[in-house]
Image (cartoon, rainbow, N blue to C red):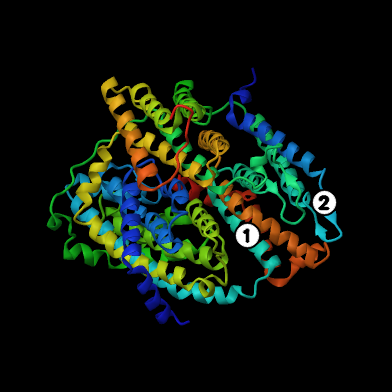
Amino acid sequence: MDILSGLMQGFQVALTPANLLFCVVGVVLGTVVGVLPGLGPPATIAMLLPLTFKLDPTGAMIMLAGIYYGAKYGGSTTSILLNVPGESSSVVTCIDGYQMARKGRAGPALGMAAIASFIAGTFGVVALMLVAPALAKVSLAFSAPEYFALMVLGLTLVVLLAGESLTKALLAMLVGLWIASMGTDLFTATSRYTFGQMELLGGIDFTIVAIGIFAIGEVLANMEPTQPAEMLPVPKGLRNLMPTWDDMKRCRFAFVNGSVIGFLIGLLPGAGATIASFMSYGIEKAVSKRPEEFGHGAIEGVAAPEGANNAETGGALVPLLTLGIPGSGTTAILLAALVLWGFKPGPLFIQDSPQLFWGLVASMYIGNVLLLILNLPLVAVFAQLLKMPGYAMYPLILGVSIVGVYTVSASMFHLWLLAGFGLLGYAMRKLEFPTAPLVLGLVLGDQMEKALRQSLMMSQGDLSILLRPIPSVLLGAAALLLVVPLFKKFNAVRVQVIDRES
Amino acid sequence: MPSFVRRGDFWAGLALAALGTYIVSEARGWVYMGEDGPGAGFFPMWYGSAMIVLSLALVATTVLRGAPEPSRSISPWQDLGRALACWAAFVASVALMPVVGFPIAFALLTWFIVAVMARQPQRTAWAVAIGGSALFYAIFEFGLDLSLPRGMLY
């Protein structure tokens, strides 16, 4: 099926009243989540995932993806008005966005953030549509050894950029692998790490871990006292939100820079939207004719990073859908969602589930238009959410978490596990253990073990099967990346990137 | 008392080393490599061993690093206490569910967060608790037809 006919089919799917409604709900929820500091897309998607089991998977995926990219639009509002990033990927927008707001130009800053997000977000979807089918064709040649090596490389990249301490990131990933191997071994029917509990024979449901670590852990972390930030006034009226023609001309390169850098960084596991936005900001400043204005309210300093963090979504979905390799905590939850609904992300995903793939792509075009409409005239309404007291939000998160987990199996035992993983999530935050490697280890652990064991079965236990051309290159690259922190010069660059992200 | 004992990394490393040891000791009881290929113990043996090595490395670097920087040491007890109090309330609410059911247990949890953690007036706390719980019940039980935890009382 060629791209154009696929896209036409996708629009037929995405434009049905039900799916359009899911798209609207997703992008509105995403914007709300983006605006509210302390509540991120991974927590929201994890909490809502169990509630989607009764829904049509295409509509549910459209909604969850809407939350993912919608949050990136919303994050800029908080950065510009409060100097607090609503999302980690909007942290760089604080630099010039807040300065613009202090100088009375909050309107054009908010407007430019929405316009750049729309342009780059749409570019990301176009690139996803063009690159994903081509990559899927290439990856058809992959078998178990290649997949194992690819997963090792993906996990290595995530671990490398997850936290300042590589040891802690690796340990978090190993805990994820351990949780993934709990339950009955599918090859030999051996019960592993079940502690004699019948409830653990089927393993631990991914949603329990994700909700515990992201949602409950987040609530517990937010219970610690913080300094309240003061919000700058929100400009009223669409006219006051529109950037001038001169602003648009100044941001021409920023739109291109944000779009291309964001998409390319999105393709790499572990790098993510925050690094994409920092890189595009750095490039924009380096090539600007007015670098001295950066940090003092340069509008390009808003357009480039906001564009990059939205284009990253398209990039991140390419390895997720065509290889089944997620690159972040949020995409790991989306992968788990697809698997739970019975889909198999990988080389045959587009061929086997064209309705879902093309429906999702088309919905992202529609979602970006909806977000532009929502974020321009309604920005004042969303900004009011920042006045919502935490005591109203936290019980809501806890309640949805309980209902979400209980819905999966109607088991009180799972609620106890939820409490345990909530405490683990909080402890990880306090001790600076990154959570993304744990979640990725958990999502990929089962497949990784399966691929390794299948490879060794193919070779009758001979490890040299992993020295075939593609696996050896991928495993060599992973080994090289793990050695990087041993070299002071390279490690300094790695730590600099992580420091920016944190 | 040595300064490294005050570091969270020291205790986290020890706990993970214990977990790694448990993983490996369990894995030793399963087939490592059978006639058909790797057995159930193959993969856990590798990641369990890696966990022991890495966690001991974490303990060793923490011990060698000496006194903790203020920002890297365990958070002040007051901050930890608030988070743990909220967690304890969550656990208590889960424990109460088989007895009083979701609506009452959730209302009590909400009251605790609003009245005790956020120090809001009792009237606000009870209004948010009862209103929130009723809203949850209406949306999930009636609206979405999802079953909430039931108790002996409700």
Residue B32 is marked as 2
Q: What element does badge 2 sit on? A: loop
B53 displayed left or right of A64: right
- Identified by mark 1, the residue type is Met
In this rendered view, identify the residue nearer to me: A192 or A323: A192
Query: Measured from the top left, where is residue A82 in percent x and y?
Result: 27, 41
Query: Measured from the top left, where is residue A460 in percent x and y?
Result: 83, 65
The quarter of the picture where the C terminus of chain A appears is top left
Q: What element does badge 1 sit on? A: helix
Residue A151 is marked as 1
Q: Quadrant of residue A480?
A: bottom right
Binning the other alpha carbons within 10 Å of mark 2 as few (below 14), some (14 to 19) or many (20 upward) gives: some
Residue B129 is marked as none
- On the question of residue A289 being in view, the answer is no
- Identified by mark 2, the residue type is Tyr
The chain holding disc 1 is A
In this rendered view, identify the residue nearer to me: B80 or A64: A64
B13 displayed left or right of B125: right
Query: Measured from the top left, where is residue A319 in percent x and y?
Result: 53, 65
Is A1 above or below relative to A299? below
In this rendered view, identify the residue nearer to me: B134 or A22: B134
Is A423 above or below relative to A330? above
At 37% across and 65% down in the image, what residue appears? A364
Mark 2 vs 1: CB contact within 8 A: no
In this rendered view, identify the residue nearer to me: A327 or A346: A346
Q: CA distance from mark 2 to mark 1?
A: 22 Å
At 58% across and 47% down in the image, what residue appears? A205
At 57% across and 65% down in the image, what residue appears? A344
The chain holding disc 2 is B
